[in-house]
Structures are given as structure tokens and as C-alpha cells.
Image (tube, grey):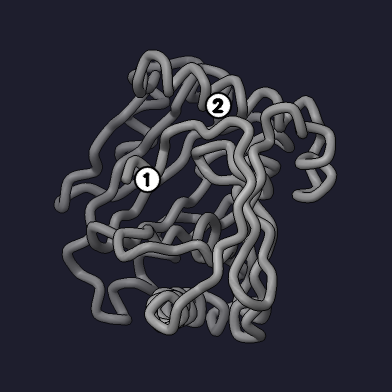
Amino acid sequence: MNREKILRDHYETIIYTKEDWTLLNHKRNSAIELLEMFVKEGFSPYVHGSIARGNVHKNSDIDIIFFHQLPSFQIELILDNNGYKNYFREIIMATPLDSIKLYIHLSELESITLPLSKLKKKTIEFYDFGGKINLNQLKSDMRITGIDKRLILIKPIPQGHEEISIIGNEARAAKEVGISLDTLNERKKVLLRREKYGRTGVYLKRQVQINETTEEVLKELADKKSIIRKKLFKR
């Protein structure tokens, strides 16, 4: 099944099986373990995407996001102290207008996103678009309404979830997930373009080698590119 194929005129009620609930609980317990590492150190990360909505499958990613700029070494130190040694790091700036982010890949299905420059309101709303929850919400078994890459609104119900195409229902969908209609339409445009042309390249992608610190690489990039300097020192 192609889970990223855009669906139009779609409505369906999905009733979860015992296996579905078991998989969801397994994924969420893994997310709780990751979030707890950082919350006990005073940080406030979220998990976003299908883990927050509940419509997981066996290859669903566990994606952790921080919304405030933090020294990356603090997060990496917490990972090191909790036995994570062989993670993969890369600095990415999707477009010249986008924020600079550090992606820490703990495994094939576990990653952490840390902003290295200030996140714009629209970027934060992107995570509301897909759905995000914090540790307490996760522990209380909360599932939140969000929109997946098929442009389907996932609305949790006690037995599973409802699926509704947002195409033609944009205003309702924006209200359901709590974002502006402009942001929703912008994200919809990106996903429709991706469906037609495939994924496009990113403006900047730089792997952080095992013998490098994130701060060193960021300084190197800032020395070479004025746009990076402006992002880093913008207040």
C-alpha cells in the first residue's frame, strides 16, 4: 500500500484490531522512553505524526521535535549518557527561507529534530498540521487530530479513527487541527507537488561526522554562507 498517495473524495472509518492497538502501544511506549530522557532534564519535546494521531503501521517513525533553540551538545550529552553512541547527525535547511535544523537519527525509525535557528510560526504550525503531543498527553493515551501525507484528516474515535480528505474541506480541516487556512493550503500545495514531481532536493544538507561537533560544523557553514549567519544571529 502506498501510504503517501493523495486521496480525494475519501471518507472511511477505521476500526482498530487487537494487533493495531498492540502495535500502537509498543510505538508509544518507545516514544515515552525517548521523551522521558529529556523531560527529566528540564526540556519539553513533543512527538509528532502518526504516533500522535494513532494511525501507525509497523514502519511508522518515532519523530521527536524540540521547538526552542538549544545548544545541541546538551541534547547529545543526554543521548550519550543514556547509551546512544552511534547516532547519525545532519544539518538541513530545506529552502533559503526555512529554519536551520539538526536531525539526529537514532535508528532507522527514530529521530530527533532540533532547531538551530528560530522557528517561524508557519514551521511550528506544520507540526500541528500532522499532529503533535507531549509526554503527559502520551501517557494519558491521548490521540490528537492531524493530517497525514495523503492529505487525509485523521480524527481519533474510541474504536479507531475516521479518515476524511481535506481536499474540498480545507476550512474545516484547518479548524480541526488548529492552524491557519493559509498554512494548511501551503502544506497541501507542497504535498500535491510532491505527488506530481516526487521529492525535490534541499537547499543545504551537511552530515556531521563522528569526529566533529555540531557547533563546529555550524560555524564552518556560517563562515561560508551569509544566509546562515543571518539566520543564526537573527533575533
Going by the numbered disc 2, the residue's amino acid type is Asp
The answer to whether 212 appears left or right of 64 in the picture is left
- Which quadrant holds the C terminus? top right
Q: Nearer the viewer, residue 160 or 110?
A: 160
Going by the numbered disc 1, the residue's amino acid type is Glu
Q: Residue 79: where, in percent of width, then height? A: 34, 72
Q: Is residue 29 above or below residue 117?
A: below
Residue located 80% across and 30% down the image: 181
Residues packed near mark 2 inside 10 Å, few (<14), some (14 to 19) or many (20 plus): some
Residue denoted by label 1: 215
Is residue 233 visible in the rendered image? The answer is yes
Counting the numbered discs, the total is 2
Residue located 66% across and 85% down the image: 140
Looking at marks 2 and 1 on the same chain, the residue that comes earlier in the sequence is marked by 2
Residue 161 placement: quadrant: bottom right
Q: Is residue 158 above or below residue 195?
A: below
Q: Residue 173: where, in percent of width, then height? A: 76, 41
Residue 154 placement: quadrant: bottom right
Residues packed near mark 1 inside 10 Å, few (<14), some (14 to 19) or many (20 plus): some
Residue located 79% across and 40% down the image: 174
Is residue 127 visible in the rendered image? The answer is no
Residue located 16% across and 52% down the image: 210
The answer to whether 3 appears left or right of 150 in the picture is left
Real-space Cα distance between discs 2 and 1? 19 Å
2 vs 1, front mark: 2
Q: Is residue 205 above or below residue 172?
A: above
Residue denoted by label 2: 98
Q: Residue 157: where, in percent of width, then height? A: 69, 70
